[in-house]
Image (cartoon, helix red, strand yellow):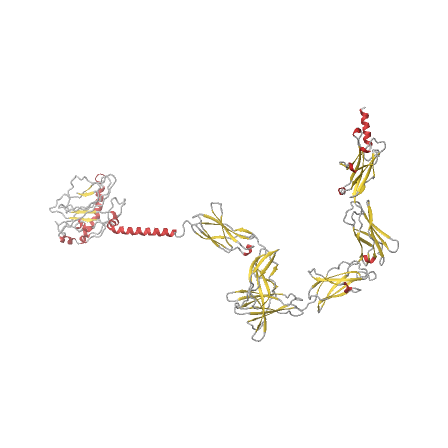
Amino acid sequence: MDTSHHFFLLLMLLHYTIGTNTTCVKIVPDSNSSIPVEVGKNFTATCHLREGSDYTSDDIEWFLDDNSSIAKQHYHKINRTSVSVTINASRNMKQETVWLKCKATRKSLSFIPPCSYGVLLLAGYPPLKPENLTCIAEQENKGISPLLKCYWDPGSRDPLLDTTYILHAKLSLGDSNYFSSCNQRLARSCTVNLGTFPVYMTVIVWVEVKNRLGSVRSDELQCDALKFVKPNPPSNVLPLAEVNFSTSLMVTWKRPIEKATMTLSYVIRYCQVDSDVWTEVPENFTRAHTESFRLQSLKPYTEYVVQMRCIEEQHESYWSNWSANATVRTAEAEPASAPDLWRIIQPTSDNRNVTLQWKPPVKANGVILKYNLYISQDNGKLERPDEIPDNQKYSMQLPPGKDANIEITAANSVGVSPKATLFIPRSDQELPGVGSMSWSVRDEELQVEWTGVPHPSYGHLSEFLLEWVNVHQRELQPHWQRVPRNVNTTTLTGFEKLKRYNISVYPIYKYRLHTQAGRTVTHIQAGRPVTKAAYIQQESPEKGPTVTVTKSKKNSAELTWEEIPLDSQRGFITNYTIFYRAGNTEHWQSVTVGANVRSHVLTDLSSEMDYVVHIMASTVAGSKNGSDFNFKTMKYGDGEVEVIVVVVCLSFLFLTVFIIMLCLRKREVIKQLLWPQVPDPSDSSIAHWSPDFPVKADMPKEDVSVVEVDVFDGKSLCEEDKTVLPLKKDKYLSEEHSSGIGGSSCMSSPRHSVSDSDESDSGQTTASTVQYSSVVASGYKGQTPNHPPPVFARSESTQPLLDCEEHPDLLNESGGHSRNSYFRRGRELESGVLTQDCNEPNGGSLTFCPVQEEEVSPIVEDPPASGVSYMPQQSGYRPQ
């Protein structure tokens, strides 16, 4: 049961499939492909139910594509089995095909699938009528091509459908009909082959256009076949220059086609090389069968370009193309204008360097072979320089107190040009210049404006001259341009970017002077210039300025920098910005100064501080920093060191004065400290003899005993070196015997001082030794003299003998007893000095005993009556 039911449903689905012959509906009109529909027009279709269908007309529904249901108001019920629908083909249907479907369905028959049928609609337009039909048959070799190519205007509307254009050509004689088809939607041209071009015959041409929505035919084009012909341009076009005819050219050419085929007329046009302004010779001058023509009223020695074309003369067919360019130069003529003369004046200390420059004549009319230059000073005779350079430049020296008149002409192979003159006045006779001048940049061109001359009474103003010089060039190469006197603005071109130019405006005066010889001389003189610098384009400087510190102080520093080289400025410097900071900080301080400033003093700086500084140069287009420079401020300011020096000097002066005054007041004390008093040997008691004995009494010869007592560490001489003492005593005794016992001690020569130690231990100099010796006459040992023996005393001092020692008689004659002063130099004695037992009697011998160390003190006493005399003692010794 279930299997049979599914099989039944499948049969019903196949029966109602779209487009099959077994469907229950059908649409009229019907087509196996598509049905064209004109855009903007109504289209009506009818849906019919086939016989035996279970549906009625009420079950029919229309659709556009699959989802767009057509509203019921567009339906029209024809009968129980037919329903029609009317739709308008809108412009939305132009881009693609649209399905129009008829569908029959009923909810009560849901077990039966709906049946439907559809047709494909294609929207479009019928073709438009072609307009402006034209045809051309071009020349081929020496004949005319049989291919007739026609052009027309198909209209601007796209038919949206495949359209066929058919070109028809028919001869007036005979039934020959030629056609060609072009299957394009918007064809604009088509070519038909006529087999042989029908010369001198009438041809009828038209275009037929067809598509599925209709067809249309253009108007017929009926004319002589030669009217369709476009000939080739004339061949071998050759312009020729003629000697002695500098303003004309002879042009010759060849016919492009035989005379029997076509009768042609020609047009010649010409222009100067590098110009786009053509001059045409009307065809009336070149009709008929001519093959040459003379061009006149041309410029001498000027290069021209000549072209030609031709056309069929009788039927006014198509013009041929222009022939290839033919170039020729007209013959030379004598120059028609004077050279353009100018000067550059560079004043020096006592002279003027004048450089004359000139340009060739504008109307040179040939090659300039030479220039004739003449110069006169102070209205003198015109003289020609010996040699004129070929670079159109001549330099000369002109003193400030002289004027000069310059004349120059140019010569070519034909003749000489008119002369150009220029007058250079004395330095104090210059004419006034223009009032003011300004410039601006527009589209990389320099627009210069100026005001008129304030005092036009200085002669007749003839024109203005604008001069511009590139100041970056080592050798000045001026450029100049002349403008009429009624113009006060002009445009200058040919400037380099980032280069500075000096722009000058000169008024040019022209006046006449009467010379002493009765001649009238015309002078052309330039007034004073008004000059300004200009740039056509500016950028930031190429490098910044280099700064140096010329003077650094405690709280300020003077900076100097050089101007940036002109080649590196690349614009006008508007200002300089100085950036500086302390070495231990990152905060920059800045100061802005003018463009003409080359030095600046930084203030409010810290003393003894490291700083970093650099300078930034700015133009209107940007800025550039210079290199860093390090400097350090001073510790002291101006005058502080001088004040310190003055204070120190004054203090030293006051101290010196104070010390001097103190020394004057304490001079005795200072004298005792610096120069201690030395004992005077003249006051010594050894220089005086005892009053009990005559000075010159005969003294018996006695032995002289000299004992030197040295100090040794912790030992007594009497105990440890008793055996040494006689040896030393004999040694000194032998040395002393040389003076004689009975002689006067004043007669002996100075003796060497004996040191405190042995000969091998010489630790003290002679100057520190005060050695005294005594000679006592006591007779032989063990004998007692009957009378008091005389005493001889002698000092071992190194000082010279006094008068009393040299002449003791003078001392005895004085009869008085002088006070003797004895001094002993304190000397530290070590313990254990050798000595005898001071308690033992020793008869008449001399014995030294050790004493305690004591200060030296003067001893004044009278000589004793015994045979022992007292002498100045060294510390630690005393006589017994």
Q: Quadrant of the N terminus?
A: top right
Whether residue 703 can be seen here: no
Q: Relative to 283, is 706 on the left or the right?
A: left
- Residue 601 lies, in percent from the top left, at 46, 52
- Residue 751 lies, in percent from the top left, at 23, 50
Taking the spot 56% from the left edge, 69% from the top edge, the residue there is 404
State the image quarter where residue 259 is shown: bottom right
Q: Relative to 70, is 376 on the left or the right?
A: left
Number of numbered callouts drawn: 0
Taking the spot 28% from the left edge, 50% from the top edge, the residue there is 659
Q: Which of the two residues, 476 or 452, is positioned nearer the viewer here? A: 452
Whether residue 464 can be seen here: yes
State the image quarter where residue 263 is shown: bottom right
Eyeballing the image, is 492 above or below 762? below
**Identity of the residue furthest to the top in this view:** 1
- Residue 708 lies, in percent from the top left, at 22, 44
- Residue 544 lies, in percent from the top left, at 53, 52
Q: Relative to 94, is 388 on the left or the right?
A: left
Eyeballing the image, is 243 above or below 685? below
Q: Which of the two residues, 340 or 583, is positioned nearer the viewer here? A: 340
Q: Relative to 280, is 402 on the left or the right?
A: left
Q: Quadrant of the C terminus?
A: top left
